[in-house]
Amino acid sequence: MEDHESQRKVRILCLHGFRTSGEILKQLVLRWPEPVLQKLDLVFLDGPFPAQGRSDVEGIFDPPYFEWFQANEEFTEYTNFEECLAYIEDYMLKNGPFDGFLSFSQGAILAAALPGMQAQVDKIKFLIEISGAKFGENRFGMPKLASNAFSKPIDCPSLHFIGEKDFMKAESIALLEAFQDPVVIHHPRGHTVPKLG
């Protein structure tokens, strides 16, 4: 008889990109091969804030659209970052436990900082980063609360999807240096969730 733990699906909290939604990320991830999806219990969370401007996916995916936090044009000042962390922590406490995160774009930037901020977030066992980046690197400034997130190499298993045509490719590659032993899958597409099959 198999033990209960081996039968349990891996529970993953999924964080969408800027001005999109959990439903949009769900539609993209559900294109993955069925044998992969059968092993996963995917929970798609909407960001805490309604989009404060036009979404790049308007006309492709239906609204509503959400954001995790806001930044100025130079990404040097952030608004609602603390509220965003509290929102995720609260969701995890009420709906957990979660084994890890699957995240895209703005959600992936946020998720990459979470293992280094373990005091604020339940213990994370792994990350799946799609078009991720690192606070404090090239394009993105450092929110005060995340200032220690990358102070030492992150000892958390991580899988990184990097698109050859992604405008965030350089940032995604730079993020790899923050992890002790990152696994990378390159795909030929741009800033999107690859199909995998």
Image (tube, rainbow, N blue to C red):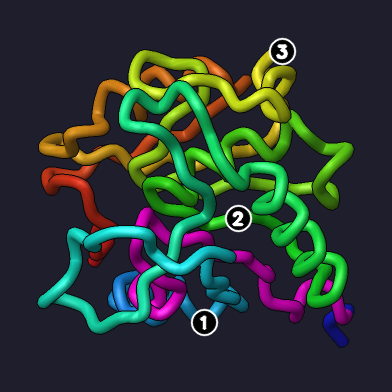
Res. 170 visible in picture = yes
Q: Residues within 10 Å of mark 2 (few under 14, many from 20)?
A: many
Mark linked to residue 38? 1
Res. 154 visible in picture = no
Report the residue at 87% width, 81% height from top. 4
Dot 2 or dot 3: first in sequence order is 2
Foreground mark, 1 or 3, reads 3
**Disc 2 element:** strand
- Name the kind of residue labelled 3 in the image: Lys
Residue on which the image places disc 2: 101
For this view, does 73 lie left or right of residue 187?
right
Report the residue at 39% width, 35% height from top. 184
Rounded to the nearest angstrom, the CA distance separating label 1 from label 3 is 35 Å
Camera-side residue of 88 and 127:
88
Q: Which region of the structure is painted magenta?
A: 4-26
Residue on which the image places disc 3: 152
Q: Is residue 153 above or below residue 75?
A: above
Labelled pair 2, 3 in contact (Cβ < 8 Å)? no
**Disc 1 element:** loop
For this view, does 78 lie left or right of residue 84?
left
The answer to whether residue 164 is magenta is no
Dot 1 or dot 3: first in sequence order is 1
Camera-side residue of 125 and 14:
14
Report the residue at 40% width, 76% height from top. 26
The answer to whether residue 24 is magenta is yes
